[in-house]
Image (tube, grey):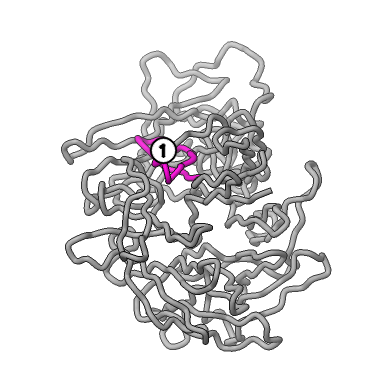
Amino acid sequence: MALAAIATRCCSASASSSSSSSLIIFSPLSRRIISGISTRRPHPTQRRMVASASSVSSSHGEGIQEPAKQERITAPFGSWKSPITADVVSGASKRLGGISVAGDGRLLWVESRPAEAGRAVLVKEPEKPGVEPIDIIPKEYAVRTTCQEYGGGAFSSSGDTVIFSNYKDQRLYKQSIGSRDSSPVPITPDYGGPLVCYADGVSDIRFSRYITVREDRRKDSLNPTTEIVAIGLNDNDSQEPKVLVGGSDFYAYPRMDAKGERIAWIEWSHPNMPWDRSELWVGYISESGDVYKRTCVAGSDPNLVESATEPKWSPRGELFFITDRQNGFWNLYKWIESENKVVPVYLLNAEFARPLWIFGMNSYEFIKSDDHKNLIACSYRQNGRSHIGILDYSQSSMSLLEALGNHFLYIEGASAVLPSSVAKVTLDCEKLKVVDFSVVWSSSPDVLKYKPYFSIPELIEFPTKVPGQNAYAYFYPPSNPIYQAPDGEKPPLLLKSHVQQEVPQLRHVEC
């Protein structure tokens, strides 16, 4: 039976349509960003499946009126009419390309606009609610990188300055966001085309430079060279970047400590993917700005297969990261530098990270606390559901936020009804409860008028071929407020085994 009705599935990856077919989203594939699946497994070498996120409260959609109650039309599945047309699906949704927080505490984000042929625009949150957001970059620029094909991590901010990758030439540009009269200034050389690209960069205040992953196709476009490089920010003329780390096939997450004395990064090489096997390294920076000594923190033991990811320096200078070495799930760990030892921060049969398909994924953030508590805001997925929690890592205790102060978080997420959104979540003084919640950005603000036609997913659980492991999927039953099926008729069933969608991100700022 034809499944054409599924084509009207909604304007975002996480909302569903009024199709008259059933839909189950699941995956038998390993360790990919997918919609609607998670698997418990006892060992890190076994396959990982990650559930989709729904971090944003559905209360944002209140007030949407359903069609007037009337007798439903009886019609076969596949013949139901829906106002969610192909034009609505293709033209209504913007895509989120990353978020950050400016020096003044306001949100920065990249959105791809269908009305501008998909141009990715850097935007800043307005000072006052109700005012239109501010476009930062001129119209002839677009923020997007082609590094490692899938991109991500195309911009970063430090104070009132942003550095971004321009899609057309793949050069890096620096621009002040404190003044509307500021124009982008290139900080990398012009190679006569998009032969060199950059991603996942951070500022190095100690040497006034920008540390980033570089992919170089000048010698071989099929097998480019990937390195971590440093780019000076003081010179008026762009200079050739300085190579800090090289030799492996791929790099990600170059992260400087607050003093600029140590750099952490993730690396891996063929034939591994980063979720199969990767290594976490720390390098020590000399007075000349070079990496003069390095040590492997995780991933070098041939008897221990692990995939380390998301290294981050705490305000106290401790290195935290996520790996799957102990229980087979991506959990938080900490490096004890004096002993060169790795210890778990909090163990749970849940995924605290996502597969590294794109640069710039951010699953946890440190929360500065006046009462010297050691707190981390984190997102994780367990038994097919997503959660946002506050981890007190000195007490090894987790508290779920009771609702989605002087601290707030920016959280990227979506729900069965709400499209991909960024929410501002304000915490109380104890950093454990939410006192305010508001949606700052939505990929499809007009999509909620179709809410009565959305199919609300049902979480289902089923056994796998591996004893003791269950998989989780979302089942989308047929839904339409106007139609009903004849008695006894079953709808066609569409199974989706791989859907890449937006992943939740966290950004923290102290007011």
Q: Residue at x 40, y 57 (%)?
A: 321
Q: Which portion, as a residue range, is magenta? A: 377-397
Q: Position of residue 137 (x, y in %)?
A: 73, 66
Q: Nearer the viewer, residue 267 or 259?
A: 259
Q: Residue at x 37, y 48 (%)?
A: 345
Q: Main secondary structure of the magenta part?
A: strand
Residue 168 position (above or below residue 324): below
Q: Position of residue 19 (x, y in %)?
A: 49, 31
Place residue 440 in its image quadrant.
Answer: top right
Q: Residue at x 66, y 45 (%)?
A: 441
Looking at the rendered structure, the kind of residue marked 1 is Ser
Q: Position of residue 406 (x, y in %)?
A: 67, 42
| Residue neighbourhood size for the residue with mark 1, other residues' Cα within 10 Å, grouped as few (<14), some (14–19), many (≥20) | few
Q: Is residue 271 left or right of residue 50?
A: left
What residue is shown with label 1? 397
Tell whether position 392 is magenta.
yes
Query: Dot 1 lies on which element?
Result: strand
Q: Nearer the viewer, residue 449 or 268?
A: 268
